[in-house]
Amino acid sequence: MSNIVIIGNGIAGVTVARHIRKRSSDNITIISSETEYFFSRTALMYVYMGHMKFDNTKPYEDWFWKKNKIDLVYDHVNAVDTQNDTLLCRSGKKITYDTLILATGSQPNKFGWPGQDLEGVQGLYSYQDLQLMEQNSKGIKKAVIVGGGLIGIEMAEMLLSRNIEVTFLVREKEFWSNVLPVQEAKLISDYVRSHHIDLKLETELLSIEDNGEGKVKSIITSKNESIDCQLVGLTVGVSPSIGFLKDSGIKTNRGILVNEFLQTNIGNVYAIGDCVERTYELSGRRNIEQVWYTGRMMGEVVAQTICGSPTRYEPGPWFNSAKFFDIEYQTYGNVGAQLNANESEFYWEHSSKKKAMHFIWDTASQVFVGINSFGIRLRHEKFDQWLRGKQSISYVLEHLPEANFDPEFSHKHEPEITQAFEKQFPHSPSLSLK
Amino acid sequence: MQLIRIIGLNLFLAALFLFLSLLFFSDYTLTKEIFQSKVKQEHQQRLLPAFENIIDKTYPNTFVFANEIKNSIEEHNSAARNQQQWDQVIYDDYVGTLTKASTQGIVVDYTLLLFLLIFGGGTLGALLFILPKIGIEVPGIKNNNIFHDALNNRGWIGILLGTLLISFYILLYFYDAYVTNWIILVEPLKKLINPNGDSSQWFLYGFLYTFAVIVMGIRMLIKYRHSNYQMVRTASVMFFQLAIAFLLPEILVRINQPYFDFKNMWPLDYDFFDAWHINMLTQSDGSVGLFMFVWGITLFVVGVPVFVYFFGKRWYCSWVCGCGGLAETAGDSFRQLSDKSLKAWKVERWLIHAVLIFAVVMTGAVLYNFITGTNSIFGIDTYTYLRKPYGFFVGAIFSGVVGTGFYPLMGNRVWCRFGCPLAAYLGFVQRFKSRFRITTNGGQCISCGNCSTYCEMGIDVRWYAQRGQNIVRSSCVGCGVCSSVCPRGVLNLEVKEEEDRFGKPILIGNNGISLQK
Ligand SMILES: Cc1cc2nc3c(=O)[nH]c(=O)nc-3n(C[C@H](O)[C@H](O)[C@H](O)COP(=O)(O)OP(=O)(O)OC[C@H]3O[C@@H](n4cnc5c(N)ncnc54)[C@H](O)[C@@H]3O)c2cc1C
């Protein structure tokens, strides 16, 4: 029996463990220094906002691990000795492995701002960050969030739920406009403002000021404005958590470098999830993908490889989702912030300014390449099929009702959407909804 | 706006306080005239000696008075029993009638005024508290601070409310004379609907129940005003409770027809096959009673399988049923308290099916007795060993005291999940022969757990969603809240072809990877 050791009990580490367990009776150990049991990082905000208890974020009950013979070790790995296949832990414990899987996730970025280590300045990634945020936000009036991404907006929503005033510094022209096309970015920016958030666009952080007791007092922006606040949320992206691998001989760049089988330069060491940097290209995907789904898919893939059926990491068409306050967002395929030269687009927005759809297709071939949807739920299965099957934009529009995933009795917008399309593209063949 | 809400809350609490304190308001004098008009001729002689020192004496509260009456009757009865004079024992329930007739004071003098103050003021207060939310909050899921709240998370308010509710049910079922003032309070309404009727504890209960469903239904409509599914469903339970469960039966009685709730059905309606009930329906004037009898049978024989096949169990449990109606309106704030553990699921399956079997056996025996004109089956006295225990343990304790009293402690569907035999029956059909399922959306689940947290039936929805598998569970009442609270658009209630409704657990993702069961 072989010893499989996994560092990291996030979605990546836990998925690989479960899938190996389904296929083999090898010893499986998961090590983590964050929490004893797997919890859903994506639900951290709901705990703070009182939608859930921390216990509710655990996808499996505590007895699950023992029953499935997955050993959990609550410890931190300080170093990996790849010569002797041994891990050195903070507690002094040494753990040997036959196969090692690194699933260590990310850490919030800090860019060396003056004052970034003051009390009251924090990121939001871990369970400990959540506890810190509880502490830091107790009794305060005002907070500043730096960085207009998904975690930033979650943090803003969290603070608002406790009636804390929020100023939001965003470097880009509109909220998240480095990812979203400008139409959607503007829609969301307006929506964010309607929640009484002071959204400062094209504004960066210069420094964080001390109140004389080591606590944050205010911040200075790139426009030389000083803003009083008692909490600063730094949400300017995350980077792979790989510091402890420095002298291990495992090759890293920004992340842990892996081949198509998610194998590192050391034969019996694999890496999955947020901490990975792919050395090979996959069209429409970045080399580091810090999303939940990537961790899950990589976990499924490596489990197959380790259990004797080598499998390449070949994720299907890109998908993702988020929620901006009350507006749900889903995306399938590739919708870039900028339209590529070979592409055409069609953008529809509902009069409520809470629903929108953005279609992208290849102009020459008419092949559909991606969609952003706001406020309307779409069926993943359908879009996955259509993207893989290289369906045309008119096919997608005509079959849009089949992909609607909104609850019963919801208002249906497909006729309006297709009409708007025909109006904007009068020369394309007329559409009939299927 | 917040000020209006605070005023509303205080107004509501004042009305509640007045309502509660009403129990202590009256004094009681049993006059000779009342005694003679309320006690049957043949009993008057027998009871008079025991009542000698009660008559014309004034008592300061209902507890002392009702106990005195009860003891006096009991005194007479035990004397009769001791002398083996069985025919002298009195079974009529005089405690309630005499207490009601002997009540004096402001509750009797100002009944209508108090009614308006309490229920008008309570409604106004509740609405002032609820309605401004429209202006304060944009539509959408607003579960902020639920787990920080002493009401919603088994804090002191929750425990207090639970205690109140449990006490209320115990008084209602077992000590109705103690709540006589409340029964008198709703008399004006009873007379309005049915001038010849007298208010009873059951009318009081029906009214309070409907009141709660309507007022809290309005809260639900506002809370979910972004979701047509939730609004339609809520409006539906409000309608069925108000029109079909509360008003229609009263009106039927007014026009000399049998009291009948057209949406209630066996085995939830466990006395449907009681001899007195069958007789009442089949021997009433005209054919209406007979129609009711046939309707009641058709509903569970044909209605259940057909509707569950096409729509799922939800057509009843979260669109029509009264218990479901209360759970979905007044109970909505407590849905997060249901137990999601695997253990709870095991307990659920044992318990609910045991109750179903109990209901079937009990009903079978009762019907057998009715048809054969006997009182026992296999030598067992049906009433004493089956019908009465069922009424007590299942009808009163489980569905009432525990089912509703424990809302703030164990969630709003304790009865529906662990006890309701009709839910068990509907569940069978839903599990094995239905087009209904909750679909999960490819690979979009992020395992956040909102769905499981807010499932009132304690289904661990996430367990299915995160492996991309459809949810087909007998207990699912189709309230749709899992879908509403999902922040990633993963869950949807659907009716489609029966084939493949369980779905293979597939998560859309890497090429060539599919999950094995
Ligand atoms: C607030 C928030 C919201 C998010 N929302 C979404 C979302 O809606 N959708 C989405 O797709 N993604 C979301 N993400 C991103 C997503 O959560 C991550 O991509 C995903 O959790 C990464 O999983 P992982 O298993 O790779 O790593 P992690 O979940 O980070 O797990 C790694 C674990 O390894 C532990 N670890 C690291 N080094 C060591 C060591 N040396 N010794 C011991 N233990 C170690 C860490 O403490 C951690 O517990 C969100 C992230 C955050 C922070």
Image: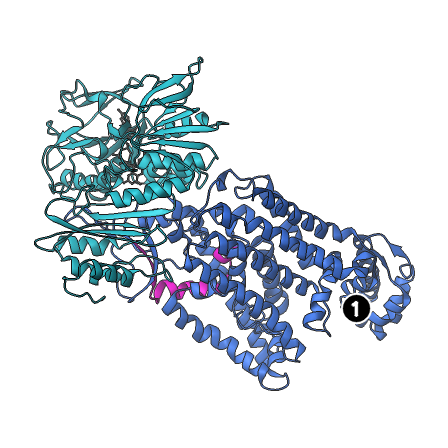
Chain colours: A cyan, B blue
Picture mark count: 1
Establish whether ligand 1 lies closer than 8 Å to the Cβ of label 1.
no
Based on the picture, tell me whether residue B420 belongs to the magenta stretch. yes
A178 or B292: nearer the viewer: A178
Q: Position of residue A306 (x, y in %)?
A: 15, 37
What residue do we see at 20% from left, 58% from top? A424
Please indicate whether residue B104 sits to the left or right of residue A317 in the image: right
Please indicate whether residue A74 sits to the left or right of residue B510 in the image: right
Output the chain of dot 1.
Answer: B
Residue at the extreme top of the image, as rendered: A212
Q: Position of residue B10 (x, y in %)?
A: 65, 45
Q: Is disc 1 placed on a helix, strand or loop?
A: loop
Q: Quadrant of ligand 1?
A: top left
User: In the rendered image, which residue does mark 1 sit on?
Assistant: B90
Residue at the extreme left of the image, as rendered: A364
B329 or B71: nearer the viewer: B329
Q: Main secondary structure of the magenta part?
A: helix
Q: Position of residue B18 (x, y in %)?
A: 72, 50
Q: Position of residue B475 (x, y in %)?
A: 42, 58
User: Callout 1, which amino acid?
Assistant: Ile
The reply to whether residue B107 is in sight is yes
Please report the bounds of the magenta region as a residue range.
B415-440
What residue do we see at 55% from left, 51% from top? B131
Residue at the extreme bottom of the image, as rendered: B286
- A47 to B298, vertically: above or below: above
